[in-house]
Structure formats: structure tokens, C-alpha cells
Image: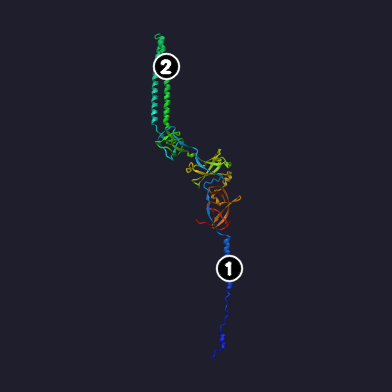
Amino acid sequence: MSLDQNALDSLRIERGPEPSSDSGKPYKGFLIIVLAIAIAAAAWALLRNPAVEVETATAVAAAGASGGGSAVLNASGYVVARRQATVSSKVTGKVAEVMIEEGMNVKEGQLIARLDDSTAKQTYALSQRQLESARIKLEEVKVRLAEAERTLRRNEQLRADKLVSESQLDASQSEVAATRARLESLRSDVEVAEGTLRVRAQDLEDLLVRAPFDGVVVSKDAQPGEMVSPISAGGGFTRTGIATIVDMSSREIEVDVNEAFINRVQDEQKTEAVLDAYPDWTIPSHVINIVPTADRQKATVRVRIGFDALDPRILPDMGVKVSFLENRGVEQSVATRPSVRLPATAVIREGDTSYVWRVQGDEVERVAVRTGGERDGQIEVLSGINAGDTVVATPVEGLKDGGSIKQKSG
């Protein structure tokens, strides 16, 4: 059977033209352009606000801050004791006993050492016997004087009765006078013997070495068996002292101030002292006086500084740094809030303005501050930041208000 060609053609599905292979290129190009713009925007944002790598520091409360004002002068010196003595004996002798050790507290008059007293005791005993002998002789002469006076009275009575001669009466009178003179001589001998005994007693006392004042023994310089002398004698074999005692209540600071800056120092001026042994401990102190003489070799003037309160940690001969504070009015001192300390490198100065970069998360902000004294690489910040705030320790280029930062790893 023959097929109708027209019927077959009616059953054919008409297809549209095949899409060209270049028809999707505009869409892909658009996506590439959008992605490139996004990458460029991100890169521009990073370049505009890069994360700067910095070192940070934390503000700490200024221990013992006096609030007296900013430092006008810094100086170094030492802790000294105004009352200190190397105790020795009054005489040369051999040490028999030493009753003290280093670090021991002693009271005024306390026995700290004793010298050999064997010879002095014998001399003292001899003086005692000499005094006793003089007193016995004195008593004997007193008896003889009483007898001579009785004889004189009898002879005077007998002479009145013409029973004795004038010569016998004269002899009795002479005997009384001679005995009285002998009595006065012996009285003088007794006084001399008593004085000699007192000297021998003092010689014994001089062999006892006592503390001249209340204090602490800081050095024990002699041992039993050694010779000591109040003067240098015997070369290196003779000690000149038993021990060194310091009156700890007399501790103060002595500093040498360059004469070019002595005009910044005044009597009773407030100061802050920091011991080299305790760099985080600020000790309130004050100027006692300015010693009225200068050292022409060093061009310095000595200044005495007293502690507001003594502490057992303050020891003689410790090194100390002192900041002389600017004097302020009472109202201003009361209004000053507790200060904090930061590394001095954290504070940036521009003319009369000072500021720091405070860290807030991953960003920094510029904060104006008011500063005080600077010492040992640390600066006192009186206002602007609080204890516990984190700041950039050493500002670097690229920091700006609101800028991103990242902290350097350990």
C-alpha cells in the first residue's frame, strides 16, 4: 500500500533552529565581571584599612601614688642611717667574750662584749687593800690624837697648880698639834686611795663594751681571743671595733643633685622614692633640707630626703631613685584621681598634647591623656585611661582611629 506523502508530512514535528554555541558568552562574561569587582573591592578595603601588627601593654595602678604632682627632677642616691657607730673599747685589750650576732636588736647600755679583765681585777683588789690600810692608819691616829688631847688637858691643870714644868706643857701642846697634822695627812691619803679605787673600778668598766644607743647589729668585727684597740695599732693583727650598730629609726636618703638644677628643689618638697631592690614600690617621701655646700669636683649639691613612713624592707646603703614632685594646691591634689603607669614609649606627644592608642578588640582608638613623672621607662598617666586598659606599647606607622590591629605573638 502506498503511503500518502502529505499525511506523512503532517505528522513531522517542526524543530526550531539549533542555538548557536556563542549565545552563552555574554552571561559568563557578566559573572566574571561581577567576581572581579568583588575581589577588587575586598582588596581595596584591605589596602584602605590594613591590620597593623603591634605590641601591647596594660595600664597598672601606680602603687603608692602621692598625687602630689608631676616630677620636676629625678636623681639617684642611697639609703643612709644618720646614726651609725662602729663600737670599740676605750682601752686596748684582748677580747674575752662577744655577746652579739649580726641582725640582733640591742638596747642602749646593753653589754655586747667583754675584754680580758684578769690584770684589772688584781689592780682593783690592790687598790682596795691600800684604801683599807689608809683607813686603819687614820683610825689609829684619831686614837692617838684623843690621847694627846687628854694629856694636854691634864698638864694644863697641873701647870695651873704648878705641879709640872712649862716645858712639859709645851711638849703636850706640840704632840697634839703634830697628831692633828698627821690626822689631816692620813685623811688626804684615804681620799687619794678612794679616788684610786674609783679609777680602778672605771678601768674594769672600760673592759665592758656596751651599746651606745638602741639599734641593730649590722656587722660583727671581732672574735674572742683577738686584740682590739680604740686606735689603729699592731698593724693588721689588732681590731679597731667590736661591731657596727645602726639606729634604724634614723634612715633617710642622700642624693647628689646637679647644681644646675638645685633651684628645682625646696625644703619640705614632696618626693617619690623607688628602691632598686623593689622597682614596683613607690615610697612617699619629702625633702628634709639642702646641705648648704657644693662639691666642686662633681658640681653637685647634697640633698637629704626623709621617708614619710619607715618600712623594714628599707635597708641602709640600698640604691634608690628619687623623683622631686611639683608642688600643687590642696584643691588640685584632692581632685586628682589615682594614676596609672604605662611604658613611656606608649605616650605620643604632639606639642602640648599627649595621647595613647587604646586597644578595643581588634581596633584602636586615639585617647588624649595627661601625664605625670617619668622614671625607669615608666610614665605616670593622671587622666585619660584607667587601670586595666590595654594600649599600644610602641606605636608604629599606619595606626589611626578605628584602624584594625593584630597583636604580635609571644
Looking at this view, name the residue that lies furthest to the bottom.
1
Q: Is residue 264 visible?
A: no
Is residue 11 positioned above or below 42 on the image?
below
Of mark 2 and mark 1, the one earlier in the sequence is 1
Give how far apart the Cα atoms at labels 2 and 1 are.
147 Å
Looking at this view, name the residue that lies furthest to the top.
162
Q: Position of residue 201 (x, y in %)?
A: 42, 29
Circle 1 packing at 10 Å, graded few (<14), some (14-19), many (20+), is few
Give the residue at x 42% y 16%.
178
Q: Which residue is mark 2?
A: 178
Task: Residue 230: name its quadrant.
Answer: top left
Q: Position of residue 150 (x, y in %)?
A: 40, 15
Give the residue at x 38% y 27%.
126
Give the residue at x 52% y 50%.
60
Q: Secondary structure at mark 2?
A: helix
The amino acid marked with disc number 1 is Val
Q: Which residue is mark 1?
A: 34
Q: Position of residue 227 (x, y in %)?
A: 41, 35
The amino acid marked with disc number 2 is Ala
